[in-house]
Amino acid sequence: MLYGIRRSGLMDKIDLVEGYPAHIAGMLLNDEIDVGLVPVAIIPQLKESYIVTDHCIGADAEVASVAIFSEVPMEQITTVLLDYQSRTSVNLAKVLLKEYWKKEVVFEDAGEDFRSHIKGTAAGVVIGDRALEQRTQSAYIYDLGLAWKKYTGLPFVFAAWVSNKPLGEDFEDAFNRANGYGLHHIDEVVADIDCNWYDMKTYYTKNISYRLDAEKRKGLALFLEKIQQSASISSSQV
Ligand SMILES: C=C(O[C@@H]1C=C(C(=O)O)C=C[C@H]1O)C(=O)O
C-alpha cells in the first residue's frame, strides 16, 4: 500500500511517517497523525474513529507473519511473551488461548530482546519480519490467522487505515486509489525486498489478504466485541 502512496500526487499534501504498529497506534491516539495503518485493537480507545479505504492487512487463513512460537507443544506452554510492537496480535493471542485452545497461561509484556527468551515452556507472540525469521527457529508455530479462521470461520483484520477525524471525500478517494495502485504492482514490491526467511511473493499474494470486504468486516466486528468484553470483565474485577 505504501508503494502506491509514495508514487501518488498525495505526497505533496501529506507527511508520511513510518514505524512499527504499536508506535503508529500511539501517534494516532495522541493525535500526532490524522490517519494511520493501525492495529485494529486500538479502535475502541479512539474518541473518534473512521475506517478509510477498502484495504487492510488481513488474512483469510495462514498469515505467516503472526504466530505464537514455542519450543514445546501448546499443552506444555505456561508463559506467553507479548511482542511490544503489536497491539492487535497480542490481544488476538489472548482471545484464542482462552477460547480456542482453552489454556490458562501467564502473559508477560516483552522488551526488545524477547525472542531470545522464547525457550522451554515460555512461548512468544512475534509479528512482522521478525516472525518470518522466527519461523526458521521455533519447533512449534501456531499461526494466529489460521487459528482465528478455524475458530470463527471468518477472515481476520490485523490493521486498517483509521483516521481520528473526517478527512473529506476527495482525500479519501485519492488515498483509496493510491493504496490500490500498490496492490497491482506486487511483483515490483517483491523485487525490492531481500528476505532470507520466506517467499515474499507467497506472503503478499497468498498470506496477506488486502480487501476489506464484508466478511473481513464481520471478522473485525467479532474481534472488537471480544476484546471489549474481556476489557469490561477485567475492569469489573479490579
Ligand atoms: C501481519 C502483520 O500484522 C500486523 C500486526 C499488528 C499487531 O499485532 O498489532 C498490527 C499491524 C499488522 O500489520 C505483520 O506485522 O506481519
Image (spheres, rainbow, N blue to C red):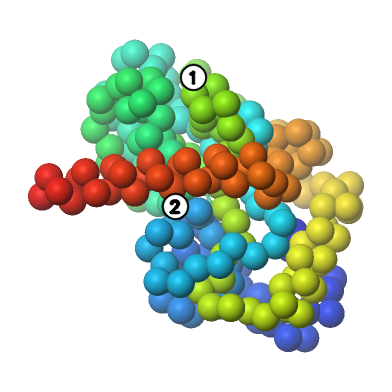
Q: Is mark 2 within 8 Å of ligand 1?
A: yes
Q: Residue at x 53, y 78 (%)?
A: 165
Q: How many neighbours does mark 2 have within 10 angstroms: few (below 14), some (14-19), or many (20 or more)?
A: many
Residue type for callout 2:
Ala
Q: Residue at x 72, y 56 (%)?
A: 54
Tell me if residue 47 comes above or below residue 147 in the rendering.
below
Mark yes or no: residue 200 visible.
Answer: no
Q: CA distance from mark 2 to mark 1?
A: 26 Å
Measuring from the top left, give residue 110's x and y in whole percent.
34, 46
Q: Residue at x 34, y 49 (%)?
A: 228
**The quadrant where residue 97 appears:** top left
Image side of residue 31 versus residue 128, left or right: left
Mark yes or no: residue 184 visible.
Answer: yes
- Which numbered disc flags the more N-terminal residue, 2 or 1? 2
Residue 140 shows which numbered tag?
A: 1
Total tally of numbered discs in the picture: 2
Measuring from the top left, give residue 159's x and y in whole percent.
57, 53
Residue 41 shows which numbered tag?
A: 2
Measuring from the top left, give residue 200's x and y in whole percent.
76, 39
